[in-house]
Amino acid sequence: MSELLKVRDLRVRYPVAGGIAAMLDRNRPSYVDVVHGVSLDIARGETLAVVGESGSGKTTLAMALCGLAPVLAGDVRFDGAAMSKARDQHLRPDRRRIALMFQDPVGSLSPRMTVRRLLSEPFRIYSELSQDPDRSVLELLSMVGLSSDFADRYPHQLSGGQARRVCLARALAQKPDLLIADEPTAGLDVSIQGEVLNLLSDLQQELGLGIMIITHNLNIVRHVAEQMAIMYLGRFVEQGLSELVFQHPRHPYTAALLAANPSTNFDVVPERIELTGEIPGLLQRPAGCEFHNRCPRVQPKCRASFPDRQSSNGKQGWNCFHPLP
Ligand SMILES: Nc1ncnc2c1ncn2[C@@H]1O[C@H](COP(=O)(O)OP(=O)(O)OP(=O)(O)O)[C@@H](O)[C@H]1O
Ligand SMILES: [Mg+2]
């Protein structure tokens, strides 16, 4: 499979808003590292699922790749060429070739535009994409399984599943090579989730798209993604072939996430880890391995330094001093 996106050590840092509290507390850092050294590869026709708790930095990673969040450091190559950075440190992707389905589908659709207008907008920006925008809109609707009647509807007249389909059609209008779908099934009934995912994989086959799918939901990962990455406080703590990660998670955090998921069948029974409380705030990033304060396998070393990446055959990698055996 040919390489489409190659990311090495990507970092996103945001300044923290000041205010009186910050002035009084000298120990408070003036920035947060939301994405903290992420590396990933996506080939054409391949899907990578990024999984992690709320606040782990998934959306920020997606935004950075689309040039919508500032990049502190890292190399990003798309289709063989290095992505340059603008002066303000935002990446400059070829916006047409990377499409983003935003996390909030209805919110990302302008309420006063009809579906027809929403779907033909990309053709106004990239006029070379369609000779006949009206016809292209109908083609897009049919690609995502909606009848032509939907062209005259407004976003508030769509169900959650229909809104997802319109967002997908809008993303496809720009004929992307890479689609980043941020929680494309959140808030949908299970049967509708299945429909949206099937649609995504059908279109992927047809168009040879690379896909990065962001999700909380491990059940969908197995169905759609051959590769997966587990994100914790801005880092990928484990990543690799989904099949291997599901069968034999090595990072205790991955094991905990999988164990919390009722329909996961382990080949190796992991120790039961209760993930209690929220992930620590980015403002108090723990020293060493960030998971140490929730980890049942913690050792003194884990509090002192962050473990290097270990891997098996390059098909599964993890950052842990005491991985599951
Ligand atoms: N512009 C910003 N300035 C400062 N902090 C930010 C900014 N954008 C995001 N963050 C912080 O980065 C962290 C990660 O946010 P992000 O939205 O990427 O998480 P997420 O993994 O997508 O979460 P969810 O699963 O809830 O969508 C959060 O703590 C958030 O407050
Ligand atoms: Mg998010």
Image: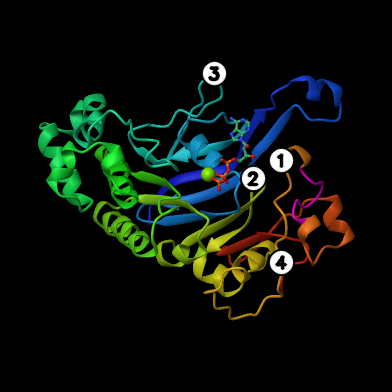
Residue bearing the label numbered 3: 87
Expressed as whole percent of the image width and height from the top left, the position of residue 315 reads: 55, 64
What amino acid type is highlighted by mark number 1? Leu
Q: Is residue 175 above or below residue 323?
A: above
Residue that mark 2 sits on? 234
Residue 25 falls left or right of residue 89: right
In this rendering, the label closer to the viewer, 1 or 3: 1
Q: What residue does disc 1 label?
A: 282
Q: Along the polypeptide, which appears first: circle 1 or circle 2?
A: 2
Figure check: 138 above or below 210: above
Residues at badges 2 and 4 in contact (C-beta under 8 Å)? no
Marks 3 and 4, the one that precedes in the sequence: 3
Mark 3–mark 4 distance (CA, rounded to whole Å):
44 Å
Mark 1 and ligand 1: say if the CB distance to the nearest ligand atom is below 8 Å.
yes
Residue drawn 77% across the image and 59% down it: 294
Distance, label 2 to label 4, CA atoms, is 21 Å
Q: Nearer the viewer, residue 16 or 229?
A: 16
* Residue occupied by mark 4: 274
Furthest-front residue in view? Answer: 157
- The answer to whether residue 230 is above or below residue 322 is above
Structural crowding at the residue carrying mark 4, measured as other residues with C-alpha within 10 Å and reported as few (<14), some (14–19) or many (≥20): some
Q: Which residues are magenta?
A: 285-291
Q: Amino acid at mark 3?
A: Arg
Q: What residue is at 54 percent from the left and 78 percent from the top?
A: 265
Q: In the picture, residue 79 is in which quadrant?
A: top left
* Residue 289 shown in magenta: yes
